[in-house]
Image: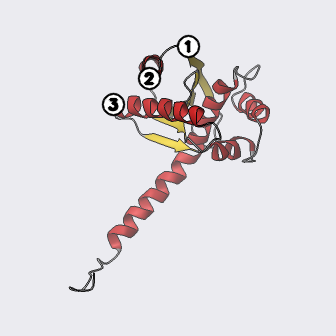
Amino acid sequence: MRVLGVDPGLTRCGIGVVEGVPGRPLRMAGVGVVRTSADAETAERLVVVERGIEEWLEEHRPDAVAVERVFSQHNVRTVMGTAQASAVAMLCAARRGLPVALHTPSEVKAAVTGSGRAGKEQVGAMVTRLLRLDAPPKPADAADALALAICHIWRAPAQHRLQQARLRARAAAPAVRTPRGTR
């Protein structure tokens, strides 16, 4: 499986591609950052992010895209830009018919380091170790994108089984009807 991980952001959007399957050594296929100028208008910045993600999708042809789920932050401007960049990544993937998975920062940290409260340095160190790299990818957004891809590779089979079980349970459940006049 080849996964494109996206750590969304308007100034720096981390991108990382990882290949592998659970239980086997993983391989980094590419890592980088799409950068935009803080002086540019938001719409222009989103176009730059979209073009960058499209280039990565075209070059690496992933099987899935893993995007960091936007979570509440104190700075509303930051969370808005992150959410907008996240939406661009999801749109690019959907346009190509690729499955998109959203993972929270704590899910990614727990998957990669064993602790949902791990710091940036711990995530970078584990990404370096898991992918057998010489040094942690810089900036941290790039390492986070690789961590997202790793998390998805490890979690996707279990998530797929859960989804299938839910669908089977829904299909097997008897239809519940509401008697007339009781709404």
The answer to whether 62 is drawn above or below residue 175 in the figure is above
Query: Disc 1 residue type?
Result: Ser
How many other residues sit within 10 Å of disc 3, few (<14), some (14-19) or many (≥20)? few
Q: Secondary structure at mark 2?
A: helix
The answer to whether 181 is drawn above or below residue 68 in the figure is below
Which mark, residue 37?
A: 1
Instruction: Name the side, left or right, on which 72 lies relative to 135.
Output: left
- Give how far apart the Cα atoms at labels 1 and 3 are: 26 Å
The percent position of residue 69, horizontal first and vertical second, equals 55, 42
Circle 2 is placed at which residue position? 57
Q: Residue drawn at (52%, 34%), measured in percent from left and top?
A: 80
Circle 3 is placed at which residue position? 95
Q: Residue drawn at (47%, 22%), measured in percent from left and top?
A: 42
Instruction: Name the side, left or right, on which 143 lies relative to 91.
Output: right
Which of labels 1 and 3 is toward the front?
1
- The residue lying toward the viewer, choosing from 101 and 87, is 87
Q: Secondary structure at mark 3?
A: helix
How many other residues sit within 10 Å of disc 1, few (<14), some (14-19) or many (≥20)? few
* Residue 39 appears anywhere in the view: yes
Residue extending furthest toward the left = 180
The quadrant in which residue 171 appears is bottom left
Query: Disc 2 residue type?
Result: Leu
Report the quarter where the C terminus lies.
bottom left
Instruction: Name the side, left or right, on which 6 lies relative to 147.
Output: left
Q: Residue drawn at (30%, 79%), measured in percent from left and top?
A: 176
The quadrant in which residue 28 appears is top right
Q: Secondary structure at mark 1?
A: loop
Q: Are marks 3 and 2 in contact (CB under 8 Å)?
A: no
